Image (cartoon, helix red, strand yellow):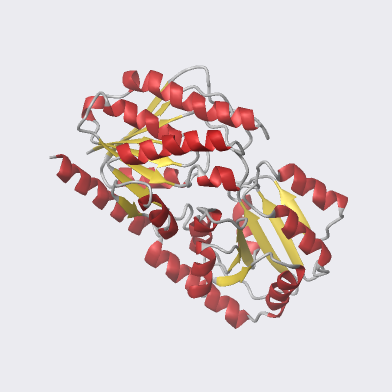
Amino acid sequence: MNILIISQGYWPEIFPINIITKNIVKSGINVNVLTGYPNYPKGKIYNGFNNKEVSVKKKKNITVNRVPIVPRGINSKFGIILNYISFLFSSIIFAPFLLKIKKIDIILVYATSPIIQAYAGLYLKLFNKNIKLITWVQDLWPNILKETKIVKNNYLISIINIVVKNVYNRSDLILAQSKSFLKEIKKVTSTKVQLLYNPGFDESKLKIKKKRKLIKILYAGNIGNAQPWEKLLSYFYKSNFNDKLSLTICGEGQKKKFVKHFIKHNKLKNVYLKNFQKDPNLKKEYQNADFLLIMLNQGRYLNKTIPSKFQTYLAKGKPLLGITSGEFGELIKKNKLGLVLKLNSLSSFKTIFKKMIKIKDQELNIYSKNTKKFYEENFSQKIINQELIKIFKECIKKKS
């Protein structure tokens, strides 16, 4: 079996598709990856990579094909758009020469924003009509764009909507990363849609420490427009809990400058902003944390999203603090994985933080046991890989 994975983001950038690809290869399947040059999240091409050429590197059963792109830049909407479009056009231009298209059985498009990268897969299908195209949807376009106000022009939204529906209708199978996504996608296409969660990125276990006088909260990931940074920091500032709670933010993103300015301007005590870190530094931050913070702004479509850090946090076996009105918040509450907070008011914020301060070791241990169990039963790399291989085999059967 020969699989082509199309994903604009790939190692050494940190995306779930890295570990997904690794596990597919471990299953004895030959994999080609079509990707760009790494530049996320800082917007510059990583050291050691030459963005002016096409690169093909093979190691055992995996071949990574990189095509030139326009780096996304820092806090530039225009730069991000050019970045997306350049990957699509580079893929269309170079992929037919890089890949042995006649030997490809399945194309898996890992459709983080933007979903237009799926058009590279649709184009390659023109050379081999027997290829099955699977689109694994990670963001609901164009709904998320409108809700987060990344795109405000209704005419442009309607065009993107047509593009997205075309991808859905021309795919052979669509995979949805949450139950809510599954329902929404089924409303707009007759193509078969199937639920498949992302696996956790890092399954290394951490020791659970006894509760300390200072409760430590960690946020690790994208510092972007989809998270309620202004409300969180202003409530943290007004709550007067700074001597009993600490918040460490590790990451990069469009809102990092705002976060940095807010902390400095308001002289926030026990709130720390750190650069996006790789092991072993980030591992120490995880180890020292009492709660792992995961949050999204409120919104009809954002509420349907399960951020990939949810699975990674679960794998750590630590209690979660969810700031959300959405699906992953319901999962936290229903399965007793931690605490859930809606940033509706300062009083609701204070109520949860008072509970965190008073929480006992026994309750923390229960949350920790539940997160481990819930992860292993629903999101482990082993389970997700088995399900994905099963999907591939079913596609091959239909093909023959």
Q: Is residue 155 above or below residue 296?
A: above
> Which image quadrant: the N terminus?
top left
- Give coordinates of residue 82: x percent, y percent: 56, 26
- Give coordinates of residue 144: x percent, y percent: 54, 46
Q: Is residue 114 visible?
A: no
Q: Is residue 218 left or right of residue 381?
A: right
Give the residue displayed 57% in from the left and 30% down from the top: 81
Front-lying residue, 162 or 14: 162
Q: Can residue 374 be seen in this view?
A: yes
Q: Is residue 149 left or right of residue 167?
A: right
Give the residue displayed 56% in from the left and 77% down from the top: 365
Residue positioned most to the left = 400
Give the residue displayed 59% in from the left and 82% down from the top: 362
Count of labels in the image: 0
Front-lying residue, 182 or 83: 182
Q: In this view, does 143 lie above or below 298?
A: above
- Give coordinates of residue 390: x percent, y percent: 24, 52
> Which image quadrant: the C terminus?
top left
